[in-house]
Amino acid sequence: MKAAIYSQKKDLDTFLYLNKFISELALREVAVVLHKDMADSLNFSKDFDTFSTKDQLRDKKVNIVFSFGGDGTILNALTFIQDLEIPIIGVNTGRLGFLANFRKDQIFEELDSIILDKNYNISERSVIKISTNSDTAIDFPFALNDVSLSRKETTSMITVESYINDEFLNVFWGDGLIISTPTGSTAYSLSCGGPIISPSNDNFAISPIAPHNLNVRPLIVKDDSKIKLTVKSRVPEYTLALDSRLYHMEVGSEILIEKAEFSLFLIKPKNFSFYETIRQKLLWGNDKRN
């Protein structure tokens, strides 16, 4: 078996922890492939096999990916996993996340179950794909959480014309618009008043950012819909964000949003509950009067 290891953290604690983790994998006869930038920064004494692209992950026949960090680390991991259908495990090195579901200490207890017995649950997470007629180069036109269009270098509102399957939906006036997957419904969309969607649902959420009209509300649509957006503004550019990656787009360019042909396969603990995670993260059930 071969496992890839990815982390954006490059401090001493991460170095010591990963050394221990790699030793535990070796005891189970698991070969490791380290993300090249991480390996170079942490200066491992042993020369490990490395990867930095999707093609390298495929060619090295990696069976599983371990992501160490938070939910943002998993979002970035999508850029090299893409459509390889390699399952990923998120090990949270901070607080409990919505995607990074394993704690640092817990993963050692679960290794035998995951590696030897292959006893785990997989949550299939939908991915958004965009296309555009803009001249701006989009190096990776996919997002696991959301796609957002927002104003750039102006205090004025922007106008977003929207169509669902070529049928006119609305003109949104405000700071922008968010199209999120169920995975992204607990991220930026939630902070803008969007709904929480269970990961098993086949939907997109369309959430306005600071809308000018207070009667404009978030909308849920089937994820087989094709969403077409066009931005108008007083300035020549607006900001397009795919998860954490930003692009400056020309006003008037058309953005087509649809479900990608592939998904991300997220390994979850056997006892994981999405609703329990929501209760913990959002402090539901806590009486603030006490």
Image (spheres, rainbow, N blue to C red):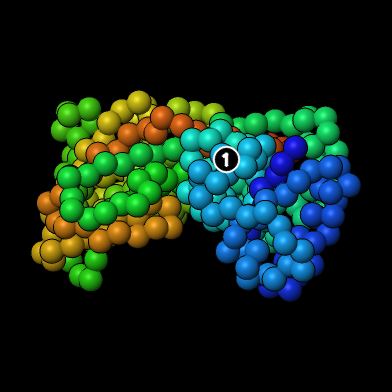
Q: Quadrant of the N terminus?
A: top right
Q: Answer with the quarter of the image where residue 174 lies.
A: bottom left
Q: Which residue is mark 1?
A: 59
Q: Amino acid at mark 1?
A: Asp
Q: How many marks?
A: 1
Along the line of sight, which residue is nearer the eye, 191 or 75?
75
Q: Is residue 138 left or right of residue 232?
A: right
Q: Position of residue 223 (x, y in %)?
A: 38, 29
- Which residue is outermost to the right? 27
Bin the neighbour count of mark 1 within 10 Å (Cα to Cα): few under 14, some 14-19, many 20 and up. few
Residue furthest bottom as drawn: 12
Per the image, label 1 sits on a secondary structure element best described as: helix
From the viewer's perspective, is 16 left or right of 179? right
**Location of residue 152 in the rendering, given as x and y in whole percent from the top left corner:** 24, 66
156 over 165 or under it: above or below:
below
Q: Is residue 89 visible?
A: no
Closer-to-camera residue (197/11)? 11
In the displayed structure image, the side of residue 199 where residue 181 appears, left or right: left
